Amino acid sequence: MSTTNLTNMSSESTQNYSADSIQALEGMEHVRKRPSMYIGDVGVRGLHHLVYEVVDNSIDEAMAGHCSEISVIINEDDSITVEDNGRGIPVGIHQKEGVSALEVVMTKIGAGGKFDKDSYKVSGGLHGVGVSVVNALSDHLKATVFRDGKIWEQEYEKGKTLYAVRENGKSDKTGTLVTFKPDVSIFKDVQSYNYETLSNRMRELSFLNKGITINLTDKRKKVDDDFKKESFHSDEGLKEFIKFLDENREPLIPEVISIEGQKNDVPVEIAMIYNSSFNENIHSYVNNINTHEGGTHLSGFRRGLTSTLKKYADSSGLLDKIKFEISGDDFREGLTAIISVKVAEPQFEGQTKTKLGNKEVTSAVSQAVSEMLENYLEEHPNEAKIIVDKVVLAAQARHAARKAREMVQRKTVMGGGGLPGKLSDCSEQDPAQCEIFLVEGDSAGGTAKQGRDRNFQAILPLRGKILNVEKAMQHKVFENQEIINIYTALGVSVGTEDDSKALNLEKLRYHKIVIMCDADVDGSHISTLILTFFFRYMRELIENAHVYIATPPLYLVKKGAKKQYAWNDPDRDKLVEDFGTGTSVQRYKGLGEMNAIQLWDTTMNPESRTFRKVTIENAGEADRVFSMLMGDEVPPRREFIEQNATYANIDV
Ligand code: 0RA
């Protein structure tokens, strides 16, 4: 099993700005000078963002009812082509600007489709910046428009127009085709497009915008003599999205509950189901953007859900025997839901600007949920009982969990119960400088303790396989000693009664939390267990880029005094060839086989190590993978492992 689907090599290339360092530059030039202001970063995310920005324009055209198919192609040279069958960007002279509207869209920052008042433009990237930004950040871009029976084209270099819009032949189709090649002098540290990342996003877009067909082709790769490709199309939208997310979970009710409508001018779409798991799994979107940090639409959903279920349960007498309070959390245990709203002028807040701030949305969503659920519960008394029973069970478990949690709280910083005995702490006091290595097993822990730089590196050995939180009820999680040790060592206390998983990150004692496990099947299983725990119980740590995975080498290649490490088979083979006859290869089976100096040199020394930063590119996909890997059903897990068997092969 490899974690590459959930993690990403990521360069720390986000730029910093102070108000006065922002020079007033002309639009396109400013984009090139300060790309991160427009696309977030110039790393992997930014590179993929370019594709989303172009696709968003086609999605807008589809939402306006004029486009049914969008094709995305990763070309052999890592350029991207996006084609749609919409009306085609207008090519006539733009009154105010005096040049072709196409040229305005492509070269004026913020021009977007704004001159078209009729089009219902609510999509548009997180940054909503428009295709001109993509143009500015591309070495080369060519736009081709099929319109009025003709083919029109224009090309640009680094955003600069090469020639006026020209006609180049006849065609009876309509649509827009854009091919761009990102400027490598801007995306310096990024290799190339990741098929899976694009595929996950195109699938997500097809669920969020039902009826559209989105094709993805990778011309860099061939499978059975044909290019690698997929086609996404969803007739049922969010309903199907829920089924996809919960594929590996056991549903408690037979059908997905769904609603679609408009409240106070806010289009709201919701789908939800209850499953037998203990996890709350809610994904929220605004204008097709995943709002990781939630916001007013999510609050509205929670409010509507809680009040409606509570009212129903009270009036139905199902709670008569219950002596204790039922909290908001209890209504969401085992719930998978998607909330998608369209907001004309979204205000995004929060650390990653993925929290919706528009106040009017709360009541719109809350009303929508209440109406939908009231009807559903009335019409489905059997399912209603199943849901209420589940809520009651969750409340009971929560009472048991409270005792366990209070114990954790007493033992963590709140009670001042001291640090875990197994922790070898560092001497540095500034958390921003501190690192903690979570190491599998006491023996590897010992080596790491000797090898580390004790000034800023702490070691916490974990005993064998930590609890699989995917299958455990909350109180079991809070009773688990290894997990208590992690909470205590990190210094973060567990949440309140109402939000049992909220963390207080200000207390975090280390800003880098490094999972260091053997590079074999067991090691990667343990890494995944730890990651599952972080994903379910400490997601803020991942979202704030505190979680890393160490990468110990697989081989030591030696000849006489010459020694080099290799992290994969091709590198090993190359070293063996370079060193020539008499070379020996030592395979590291585990961290324990390295001595302290080797471990420092290869895996812990900031000068020479490689860490993989754990990121959540796509929360829905991450959730699906965790529920599959750690859940009950074996066949999908086997299939996933076979497809991602990087480590599994090595041991053969
Ligand atoms: C504004 C007006 C019209 C089309 C578009 C924008 C448009 C933009 C893009 C970007 C990618 N694909 C697109 N397809 C269409 C058309 C106005 C009209 O025909 O009356």
Image (cartoon, rainbow, N blue to C red):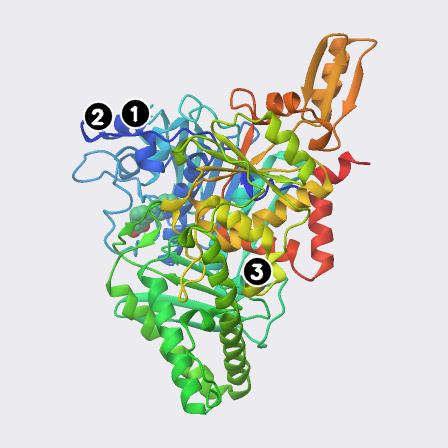
Q: Does 562 appear above or below 303?
A: above
Please name the residue that numbered disc 3 is placed on. 479
Amino acid type of the residue tagged 2 in the rendering: Ser
Amino acid type of the residue tagged 3 in the rendering: Glu
Residue at 48 percent across and 54 percent down: it is 411
Report the mark closest to the observer, 1 or 3.
3
Please name the residue that numbered disc 1 is placed on. 33
Q: Total number of numbered labels?
A: 3
Please name the residue that numbered disc 2 is placed on. 21
The answer to whether 294 appears left or right of 579 in the picture is left
Q: Is the C-beta separation of discs 1 and 2 under 8 Å?
A: no
Pick the front one: 213 or 175: 213
Circle 2 sits in a helix, a strand or a loop, which is it?
Answer: helix
The answer to whether 116 appears left or right of 603 in the picture is left
The quadrant in which the C terminus is found is: top right
Percent from the top left, x then y, of residue 529? 62, 49
Between discs 1 and 3, the one toward the N terminus: 1
> How far is the residue under mark 1 from the one under mark 2?
11 Å
Mark 3 CB near ligand 1 (8 Å cut)? no
Circle 1 sits in a helix, a strand or a loop, which is it?
Answer: helix
- Which disc number belongs to residue 160? none
Q: Does 57 appear above or below 396?
A: above
Amino acid type of the residue tagged 1 in the rendering: Lys
Q: Crowding at label 1, few (<14), some or many (≥20) Cα neighbours within 10 Å?
A: some
Q: Crowding at label 2, few (<14), some or many (≥20) Cα neighbours within 10 Å?
A: few
The answer to whether 163 appears left or right of 508 in the picture is left
Percent from the top left, x then y, of residue 170? 43, 39
